[in-house]
Image: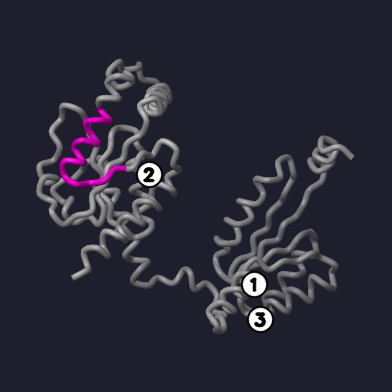
Amino acid sequence: MTDSLISTLNEDRKFHLHLVSDSTGETLEAIIAAALVQFEGVNVSKHFWPLIRTATQMERLMVDIKEQPGLVMYTLVNPEIQATLEQNCKEANLPVLSILDPVISLLGSYFGMQASHNPGRQHIMDANYFDRIDAVHFTMAHDDGQLAEDIPLADIVLIGVSRSSKTPTSIYLANKGFKTANVPFVPNCPMPAVLDNLPDKFVIGLTASPERLVQIRTNRLRSINEDEEADYTDIDLIKDETKQCRRYCNERGWSTIDVTRRSIEETAASIMNRYKSWLEARQKP
């Protein structure tokens, strides 16, 4: 049977996925969404069943699942609830899979200890959670050079030319708990004076290849229905702009990252690794 014929048959058939969780189901939903993109053209109906925390709830849920039988996938950490689901699926001849069990089992073996089996622990609002919220608020308030006088309060300061992914990188770092301020480098425009008095602050510059910046800036202008600005998209001027930005950072002892071939995640990971090394160097006697 050809792939095209299989695809046509799958489009006509509806597949039911039952996603069962003892918490909000966000983890399970994200994993399934990432996996489903590999199966184009399949007609999938997803059924979400969050906050299932007792065997009685599970028994009642099985009535609904059996009405629209399909694949059952779950993130449950309580052994009794797991056993109830597994037994019911076996009796109903439904395929069932635990998403977390292999990971928890391997971690337990590696750590040499038992898992706590407490549902929803990743969503506990502890001090780290509120630190991340504070970081996001700070970062949004200090985007694109705003409130420059607060830059000394930031954990990380990003400086970069226009369209070098300063804002999305800052937001990603904020979600990791880092208060991040970003400042645009604009040729012939004075930079905030506070940047010349940061002896004990982690600052990093972001640049990209001029060719890539031309492409991104041109697409940006078109997306907002703006006429192309000659200076903003001129390759020679952009080459000079990126050189000036690197020179500005190098003169102050700040390293730079070329983001041309990096995703936001890769850029942020590099920044976090450098930040960690920077902190360790500061702590050495």
Instruction: Decide if residue 224 is in sight here.
Output: no
The quadrant holding residue 79 is bottom right
Comparing 141 with 274, the one in front is 274
The quadrant holding residue 64 is bottom right
Pick whichever of labels 3 and 1 is earlier in the sequence: 3
Most extreme residue toward the front is 285
Circle number at residue 79: 3
Q: Residues within 10 Å of mark 2 (few under 14, many from 20)?
A: some
Front: mark 2 or 3: 2
Which residue is disc 2 drawn over?
A: 168
How far separated are the C-alphas under marks 3 and 1?
10 Å
Circle number at residue 101: 1
Assess whether residue 254 is covered by the magenta stretch. Answer: yes
The secondary element bearing badge 2 is classed as helix
Amino acid type for the residue under numbered disc 2: Pro
Q: Quadrant of the C terminus?
A: bottom left
Q: Is the stretch drawn in magenta largely helix, strand or loop?
A: helix
Pick whichever of labels 2 and 3 is earlier in the sequence: 3
Q: Residues within 10 Å of mark 1 (few under 14, many from 20)?
A: some
Read off the magenta span.
241-256
Assess whether residue 42 is covered by the magenta stretch. Answer: no
Q: Is residue 1 left or right of residue 197?
A: right
Q: Position of residue 164 (x, y in %)?
A: 34, 36
Front: mark 3 or 1: 1
The secondary element bearing badge 1 is classed as helix
The secondary element bearing badge 3 is classed as helix
How far separated are the C-alphas under marks 2 and 3?
41 Å
Residue at 27%, 65% in the rendered image: 280
Q: Are marks 2 and 1 in contact (CB under 8 Å)?
A: no
Q: Is residue 113 shown above or below 221?
A: below
Q: Is residue 205 left or right of residue 86?
A: left
